[in-house]
Amino acid sequence: MPQPPKRDAAVVLSGGGINGVLLELGFLRRLREDPIWSRIGWIYGTSAGALAGTMAALGRLEDLEEFLLGIQPEDAFRPRPFWRLPGGPHDYTLPATIAARIGNPHELGSALAAAEIELIVFATDVSDHSDADETRDFELQYPSHSTEPEAMGRAILASAAISGLVLPVSVNGVIATDGGWVRNFPFEHAYRNREVAAIAAFRYVPSYRPTDAAYLERARERLERFRAVPPVKALLAEVRLAQERAERGEPAHYGEMIVRLMRVAFARNVVLEERLAEERATSVAELRRLRADIVSAAVAAAPPWRRRRLRSELDARFGAARFPFRHDRHVPTLIVRSTPGDDTLDPTFRSARWPDETKRSLIERGYRLTDEALVDHTGLDEWRRTSG
């Protein structure tokens, strides 16, 4: 009787908004054609990666494609009237859209709890904590096999709640928002899972068009008709100042400043995560080589009668060493990185429609880059041969 495949691989999906989830769909479609797919036991996802990871864990990539081809900006983040901006510049319409087209939070959470692949999503804790606690890292982690289904479904929505656009979501009494602030690329968690023997990851690399300040000109033209009214006159002066700032390349207003800071934090977060992974991999390899060299040199210099015991003692000493990166293993890793290129669909304060042609182009881009990476990657081939 054939044995079920060993599930010892993990997938890591970063945040990236609408661009990221489309590219990740292409990444996942190509990965599904590779032998690694049957061995995936865990998917770690943040924001866009939480949504893409949900559908991958449930084996519903076709449904994800249909959902993405049908979605428009107002289905995710509907712009609010100017006078309602204290509540956020957009209404978070994505939860209702997902519930209507994919499944409500409880349905998704229940399906994930029963799935073979475990999904782990990440959100940021923005609850009001009156007492300072230097041990808190503000990271919320939700594993689908141990999180209550309703909470799991809401955690996915919280992870995708872009905090530059909408207010956070409550998950079991915890106020949670976009996981990108603390873990936009959750590679570290996959690596720390001792059951993971190989990792395939997608990292979205954002690129941003210059800010279009045309909306300020339109606002100024509308306000000019009422410039005799003192409050409008004062507002006109602020709009003119905003236009001047935009012309100098500065944030035109406070909302844009928040968005810029969010981009910086997310990008820095991902760079540090990947740098740590690279440094860890190097440290693991160097420590293993150093251990082998020292043991060999010491044993060779010892009297013959002492060598066997000395080797045993040195192995025990190295085994007990508490290096931060002490691992007796190497984890083959494939990381596909991608920008949206010329096709960018990021929502702004007033988003245009998202054309199907552009969406399909992003999906194809993710597929093609993954195909190229798999062809050029020898580490996964070695893992398949030695552990298959």
Image (cartoon, grey):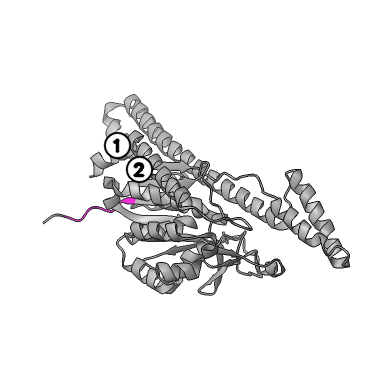
Question: Depth-wise, is mark 1 or mark 2 nearer the camera?
Answer: 2
Location of residue 385 (image quadrant): top left
Q: Which mark is residue 329?
A: 2
State the residue in front, 318 or 119: 119
Say which amino acid is labelled 1: Arg
Establish if 197 lies above or below 81. Answer: above
SS under mark 1 = helix
Location of residue 248 (image quadrant): top right
Q: Which quadrant is the C terminus positioned in?
A: top left
Q: Which mark is residue 309?
A: 1
Q: Which quadrant is the N terminus positioned in?
A: bottom left
Q: Is residue 315 visible?
A: yes
- Rounded to the nearest whole Å, what is the CA distance between mark 1 and mark 2? 25 Å
Establish if 286 lies above or below 33. Answer: above
SS under mark 2 = loop
Left or right of residue 211, residue 101 in this image: left
Left or right of residue 280, residue 250 in this image: right
Residue 323, percent across and down? 46, 44
Establish if 244 lies above or below 231. Answer: above
Establish if 177 lies above or below 271. Answer: below
Say which amino acid is labelled 2: Arg
Q: Residue furthest left?
A: 1
State the residue in front, 299 or 26: 26
**Is the residue marked by circle 2 packed among few (<14), some (14-19), or many (20+) residues within 10 Å?**
few
Which residue shows up at 32% across the image and 40% down it? Answer: 380
